[in-house]
């Protein structure tokens, strides 16, 4: 891979310092399609997440000015610092889309997705497909940094396409030279998808090879996992993804030494359901609100007596009014 002079492409050192300040405790909410919308991001931010990311956004959708794509990016000031994650297969399109995002929304960070293993993304050459051709990754990163020098540009990636093609060290050295300000590594290959164990040794290796912040991601479900990955890898932060589903409290668990997840009770669950529902009603149209309420409530309503009965009741709701009635019944049941 041709290495450009560090000074020609790196965004300002100030951008690097900005990112490090944003990390604070080093706890980051991962971008997750269909999950990390405004209401959920806001809950996680209030629970202690330092940085939150949007769902990943198609650079092609941004260039076409798709309302659906722009809606994924919309955020409120209370969410800052916030990053917008983008994906695409054509370097110039990804770069242009980053500029549109910055000009319209002024996020604190733009993240490039080199980690998505989903075939409908990779077969087009986007997401983790870039791990098969680092020259494409290089051109994409150059394009984004040149179009948006004002804020930190970060990357989330996997360790490689397959176990015999582990390339994250080579890629990361290049990315740092280009001006990327932090790298999140999910140490599984594309072929693994979400099976097997995340190889934290690869995060440790990466941390020893580059100077920019390294964010570890994968198989962190609680405070014990968090302490283990930090000790094992010396990473600068940890990105939480699937462990936050139905459990935004995990950010409180990781950032508040006085918080004990064992103290959480059914009233806490009822409260978070109501709070999340109120946010969904505020920011989503009715059909989407109803569908997302069912999705998130199916994650929240587990692990306590009669949880399955309440879950079924909400899943059968046919309208917002049905959810309101069921919520009132649930509150009456546990608060009386």
Image: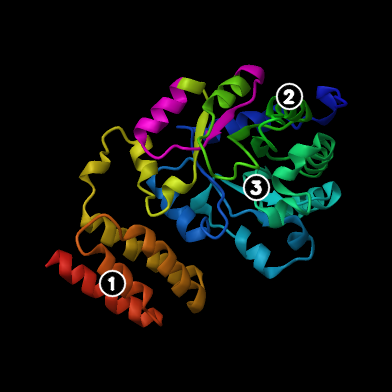
- Nearer the observer: mark 2 or 3; the answer is 3
User: Which numbered disc, 1 or 2, marks the residue that appears first in the sequence?
Assistant: 2
Q: Height in image: 207 above or below 100?
A: above
Task: Give the Cα distance between marks 2 and 3.
Answer: 22 Å
Residue 246 rendering spot, x and y as whole percentages: 38, 54
Q: Is residue 254 above or below residue 245?
A: above
Contact between marks 1 and 3 (CB within 8 A): the answer is no
Q: Quadrant of the C terminus?
A: bottom left
* Residue located at (72% from left, 29% from top): 167
**With 92 as the anchor, is 61 left or right in this view?**
left
- Using the image, tell me which numbered label, if any, was put on residue 242: none
Q: Is residue 238 above or below residue 76?
A: above
- Asked whether, in this view, residue 197 is left or right of residue 263, the answer is right
Q: Is residue 137 left or right of residue 288?
A: right
Residue at label 2?
173
SS state under label 2: helix
Residue in the picture at 52% in, 55% down: 36
Please give left or right for residue 293 compared with residue 100 in the image.
left
Dot 2, crowdedness within 10 Å: few (<14), some or many (≥20)?
Answer: some
Q: Which residues are magenta?
A: 208-231
Q: Residue furthest left?
A: 336
Crowding at mark 3 (Cα within 10 Å: few <14, some 14-19, many 20+)? many
Residue 27 in view in this figure: yes
Q: Is residue 41 magenta?
A: no
- Give the residue at mark 3: 117
What is the number of callouts on the image?
3
User: Which callout, 2 or 3, points at the residue further toward the start of the chain?
Assistant: 3
Which residue position holds label 1? Answer: 327
């Amino acid at each position: 891979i041709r290495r450009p002079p560090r000074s020609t492409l790196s965004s300002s050192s100030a951008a690097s310092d900005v990112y490090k300040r944003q990390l604070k405790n080093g706890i980051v909410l991962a971008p997750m399609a269909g999950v990390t919308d405004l209401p959920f991001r806001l809950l996680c931010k209030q629970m202690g997440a330092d940085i939150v990311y949007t769902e990943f956004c198609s650079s092609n959708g941004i260039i076409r000015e798709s309302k659906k794509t722009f809606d994924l990016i919309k955020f409120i000031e209370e969410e800052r610092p916030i990053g917008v994650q983008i994906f695409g297969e054509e370097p110039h399109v990804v770069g242009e889309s980053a500029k549109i995002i910055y000009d319209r929304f002024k996020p604190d960070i733009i993240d490039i997705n080199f980690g998505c293993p989903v075939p409908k993304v990779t077969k087009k050459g986007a997401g983790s497909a870039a791990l098969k051709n680092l020259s494409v990754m290089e051109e994409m990163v150059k394009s984004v940094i040149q179009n948006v020098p004002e804020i930190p540009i970060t990357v989330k990636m996997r360790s490689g396409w397959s176990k015999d093609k582990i390339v994250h060290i080579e890629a990361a050295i290049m990315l740092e030279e280009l001006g990327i300000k932090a790298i999140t590594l999910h140490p599984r290959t594309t072929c693994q998808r979400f099976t097997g164990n995340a190889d934290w040794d690869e995060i440790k290796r990466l941390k020893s090879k580059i100077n920019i912040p390294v964010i570890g991601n994968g198989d962190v479900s609680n405070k014990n996992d968090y302490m283990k990955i930090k000790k094992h890898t010396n990473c600068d932060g940890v990105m939480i993804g699937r462990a936050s589903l139905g459990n935004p409290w995990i950010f409180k668990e990781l950032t508040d030494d006085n918080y004990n997840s064992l103290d959480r009770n059914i009233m806490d669950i009822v409260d978070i359901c109501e709070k999340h529902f109120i946010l969904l009603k505020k920011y989503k149209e009715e059909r989407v609100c109803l569908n997302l309420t069912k999705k998130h409530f199916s994650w929240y309503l587990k692990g306590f007596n009669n949880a399955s009965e309440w879950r079924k009741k909400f899943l059968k709701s046919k309208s917002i009014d049905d959810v309101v009635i069921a919520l009132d019944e649930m509150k009456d049941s546990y608060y009386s």
